[in-house]
Each structure stands twice: as structure tokens, then as C-alpha cells.
Image: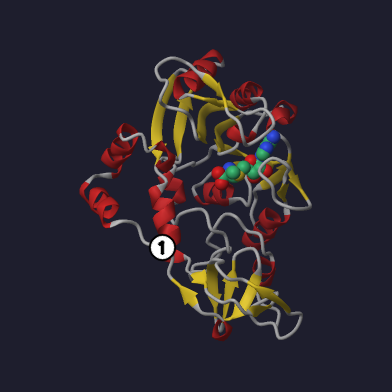
Amino acid sequence: MAHALSKIWAYKTWRQRIAIDDQGHYTMGYLSLPDEWEHNHLQPSLNGKSFLDVGANDGYFVFEAEKRGAQRILATDIYHQGRNGNTGGWNIEGIQILQEHFKSKVEILPKSIYDLHTLNEKFDVVLCTNVISWLDNMNEALKQLSDACNETLYLKDGFLTRYDPEPVLQYEKGKALVAFRANLSYIKEVLGSHGFKRFQVVPVISHRHFEWQMSTFPLVQSKQALTIFDLPDATSNSIQKICDGQWILAEEGDFCFIKNTGWVRKSEVKIAPRGQKSWMGKMIKALLSEEQYGDYIRRKGLEKYVKSYMVIAQK
Ligand SMILES: C[S@@+](CC[C@H](N)C(=O)[O-])C[C@H]1O[C@@H](n2cnc3c(N)ncnc32)[C@H](O)[C@@H]1O
């Protein structure tokens, strides 16, 4: 049976979770909250605006921008055909499947953040989330983003906060060969030098992601090799694999989808809920508003729970 969603279901390495119809079907990603757009403090309407997403990944934000009235929409990333990697490139297949599925006018362009100048085009709204901390030349990236922007830049990443208000760029071991992480004052200073005049900074708090993932995606509990299928209505092409401890990301009929692996018969798997948070943590969070909870986390030095900050810069 050729199902309308078969291309989406056969692609196994979705990262973003994107609504694909109004029947409650999503791409089988594990990121993107149901209200990811609002969670990132993006403007509700893009009526008539041009929109550029840099590091657009599987396309959550560009397809959402289209729904919100953007006129011209460009998705760039170091798209290629191959494996997904935060520094090496992102498989173009996912976003292309969705472009076709939505009959979308979104343009998809393989282009590094460092080459935005070759577009010779400026956009009203530019978005760049969770990209710059993977780069080895953040200053150049900020210049390129600024030059591509007419009006508003949304820049989200895991910025440092403990050194504010002094502008600081700190060497960070780990992610790449040479990685520097900036604090918020540094980012404002650099963007200010590229013509941005007004700034708003909002924490994007990670506990919502963790909780949503805990409650939405149970774990496989099975030491046995499971039979993996390409599609939920497949009868052949199966392989055997041990998937103990992996996440279940979707269900369809008698099948469920294991993260990055494929479909298995529900009758073959045992699943268990993921770990629960402490009663203390739950209580504190229930008592405080999201903003207060963010402040509490900062004061307690628990910043690893604040995933990132959204800097909204305006020219
Ligand atoms: C952690 S993901 C973030 C994806 C998306 N922006 C989001 O917030 O869900 C990092 C993305 O940055 C892309 N990326 C890495 N280096 C890049 C570069 N030099 N130019 C453009 N995109 C890049 C990766 O391919 C990947 O899609």
C-alpha cells in the first residue's frame, strides 16, 4: 500500500518534531515542543515579511513561518546528502520531503553561515538558533547574520551569563577544535557594532523540553532482538536489532517508531515510562511562574537547566 506519508515514515533520522497533518501526525523527531515557536519568543505573525533561517535543520521554523504569513522564506544549512552532524552538515532529505509534502514555497539552499554574503539579499526577520556555539569563528558568523538582516534578528544559544555586564568571550573546551562561548553583553556589543539598536534577552528554559520528552516518549524495554521495518505497513525488509533503552517516538496502527531506527510491531515490545523528577523539583516549579523559575535557577547556579537565551535584536 502506498501511503501518503510513506516518505516521511521511511526517513529515520528526524531531529525536529513537525506536525504533518491535522490528524495528530508528526515527523518522528524528539525536539520541538508543540508550541516551539512561542517557546522561542518569536513574533506571532510574519505577515508579508521575508524570513531567513540559518541552520534550518529539518525545517520546523521555516514551515511554521510560512503558516504565519511570511512571503519569502529561505532555509539555509550546510545541507548535504549524508549523515546528520552539528558541525559536519545536515542531511537535506528531511526538509526536502516536507517541502514536497506541504507543497511549500520555502526555498532550501545548502549554504554555510559564513557565506550568507553571497546571497546578496537582506531579510526582514533572520533566525539562528543553536548554531553559533558549534562554530569556530563566531564573530564572522555574527557579522554575516547582521548583514543579512534588515529588521529583526533572533539569535538563540547557550550564552554565558555569570560574567555580565562585562563583555566576555571564553574559551570552551569540548565541542569543536576551537570553541568560544560569549556572554550576553559580548553578543550585544558585537551586534551593536553591526547596526542593531535595541535588544531584548529572554531565557528559553529547558525543563519544559525534558518534561515533555519524559512524558511523551517512553523507553523500549527488551533485551531481545526486535524486528525492524521500514514502514508501518511493511511485511518484508525487516532486520533484527536490540533496542533496549531506546525511545519510542511515534505510533501508527499496530506499529511504533524507535528513535533513529525504524518501526517495530507493538506486540513485540515492552515499553516503560522514562524517569520522573524529584517531588521537591516538581513542587518548586509548580509554585513559581516560568520567569520566576528561570531566575531561581540562575541564582542557584543551576544554569545547565537553562538551555539557552534568545537575543532579539532590532535595527
Ligand atoms: C543543534 S542544530 C540546531 C538546528 C536548528 N536551528 C534548531 O534550533 O533546532 C545545529 C545546526 O547548525 C547547522 N550548522 C552547523 N554549522 C553550520 C554552518 N557553518 N552554517 C550553517 N549551518 C550550520 C547544523 O547542520 C545543524 O543543522
Q: Is residue 211 above or below residue 89?
A: below
Q: Residue at x 69, y 60 (%)?
A: 97
Q: Visible in this render: residue 302?
A: yes
Type of amino acid at the residue the image marks with label 1: Gly
Mark 1 lies on a secondary structure that is loop
Task: Provide residue 186's location: percent of width, then percent of height.
Answer: 50, 19
Of 282 and 200, the residue lying toward us: 282
Instruction: Please state if 77 lies on the left or on the right of 156 as rendered.
Output: right
Of 77 and 309, the residue lying toward us: 309
Task: Provide residue 143's location: percent of width, then percent of height.
Answer: 62, 21
Task: Provide residue 287's location: percent of width, then percent of height.
Answer: 20, 49
Task: Provide residue 298's location: percent of width, then percent of height.
Answer: 34, 34
In the picture, which quadrant includes the N terminus?
bottom right
Q: Quickly name the residue at label 1.
A: 275
Q: Residue at x 52, y 27 (%)?
A: 151
Q: Is residue 181 above or below residue 277?
A: above
Q: Is residue 144 above or below residue 32?
A: above
The quadrant where ligand 1 appears is top right
Of 247 and 278, the residue lying toward us: 278
Q: Visible in this render: residue 315?
A: no
Task: Give the class, few, some or many, for how many residues have Cα within 10 Å of label 1's Cα (few <14, many ≥20).
Answer: few
